[in-house]
Amino acid sequence: MSDNCRVSEALYVGLCGYIGTPTEVTVRREVEDMAEMTQIPVQVDNGFRIITSGSRREGFRFKSSDIDMMLWFTNHKVITELSQSSVYDLLTHSIILIEDTDTPPGFVRLQILTSLRNRIIELSVVSFNDGMYISCVRWRQKMLTLWSKIITFNNVKTHGPCANGFIYNLETDYANCFHCSHWSRLTCHWRKRCTLHHWPPNHVFGDILKNGCHFVPIGNKISADENELDWRLSFSQAEQKLVCSMNHTQFLCYGLLKIFLKEVINLDIEETFMCSYYVKTTMFWLMQIGHITWRPNNLLNCFWKCFKYLLQCLYRGVVPNFFVPQNNMFVSKLSTVKGAHARMCLLEQLYMYYEMGVTCCLLQSPTVKRMIEPVICNSFVRKKNTS
């Protein structure tokens, strides 16, 4: 057996202990599923839905993991074309039409077509081109004020499209969004690509399409001022299903990338350039078209291919969104002098790790070092004794 295989297997076992075994991860997800299912009837009866997203929903239990929640009102229906309004009862539902022409890739506008049934939405509406649209800026402000009044939700502030705060000592992000059962035409190329590459599997792909997508209140930030009419497409539910479809080697590689990001790349950096969403996106791209053998004794190679993909993205200044590839998620960061400088510094840092090679690169992480150093030392002693 090669040294890389030995280190890969030791890493796999170590990560199973640190992140979780296949059984432990499955149980965590099933508990979340059951909790969500039992709450649906009560939520729908009260006119809203809440789902959990983010790393905890995916099955991770890192100490630093916060809770990500998405909330939307069920009596406001979002459609992608006018004919879809016929399936809704206009006496009980408000209809909102998405506009995805003349918007940046991955963003839409939300136009009000009928009377509204929520005071907060009414106060968030602005006029534009003879139509009425929901302002993401006003919506965030209204929801932030609302969350600030909840006694158990402390230190509330805006965090991207979310209201961020603490419930007791647990950091929580609430994204008040809109849900659409229909997929925007912006995602048509993604659907074709999934069919072409046969990933995700058909049952996962069908489940993703059935559950639709969301729109979160944050505008395009290429310019200095945010466009208040833009709402960003969110695929949190789809991403959670894609993560749950991973085999355990893929899931551990994803976790390994998150560990490396936290303990090495972003160590002691206040405003980070690289975020965990880029890591997740990397996993999706390479699972779909990466031609990687995802098995325990190949874990080092799996990690290294992901690392090199991220390095290539950083070098090109382009990290394409998995669902809407025309959306370069680096754009807003690179639109400022500070962001462009941060990219160059990070590029030098990652190239330095690349020069080290995969094993030495991973040894920079204290958590990973504890898992693989004994195997590396044994291999060194064995070679020394046979020479």
Image: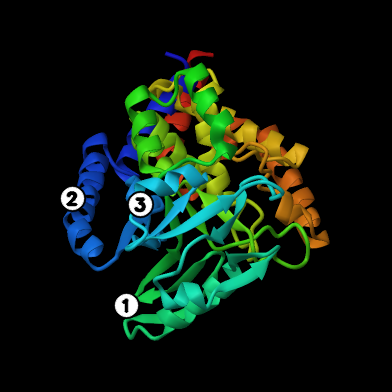
Quarter of the image for the N terminus: give it.
Answer: top left
Residue at 36%, 42% (x, y): give it.
211
Disc marking residue 18: none
> Where residue 169 sits: x, y (%)?
35, 75
Determine whether, in the image, residue 107 is placed left or right of residue 372: right
Tag 2 or tag 3, which sits nearer the N-term? 2
The quadrant holding residue 359 is top right
In this view, 242 is above or below 137: above
Q: Which mark is residue 88?
A: 3
Amino acid on which disc 1 is placed: Tyr
Indicate which disc, 3 or 1, sits on the residue closer to the N terminus: 3
Separation (CA) of disc 3 from disc 1: 40 Å
Q: CA distance from mark 3 to mark 2?
A: 29 Å
Q: Secondary structure at mark 2?
A: helix
Q: Residues within 10 Å of mark 1 (few under 14, many from 20)?
A: few
Residue lying at 60% horizontally and 66% vertically, measured from the top left: 132
Q: Nearer the viewer, mark 3 or mark 2?
A: 3
For label 1, the residue is 168
Number of the label disc, if any, that sits on residue 34: 2
- Residue at horizontal 68%, vertical 57%? 220
Crowdedness near tag 3: few (<14), some (14–19) or many (≥20) residues, C-alpha within 10 Å: some
Q: Amino acid at mark 3?
A: Tyr
Q: Quadrant of residue 36?
A: bottom left
Q: Are marks 1 and 2 in contact (CB under 8 Å)?
A: no
Type of amino acid under label 2: Met
Closer to the camera: disc 3 or disc 1? Answer: 3
Between 386 and 203, the one lying in front of the other is 203
**In this view of the protein, can residue 81 be seen by the observer?**
yes
Q: Quick check: 61 left or right of 226?
A: left
Q: Which residue is painted at 46% across and 53% down in the image?
A: 78
Circle 3: element type: loop
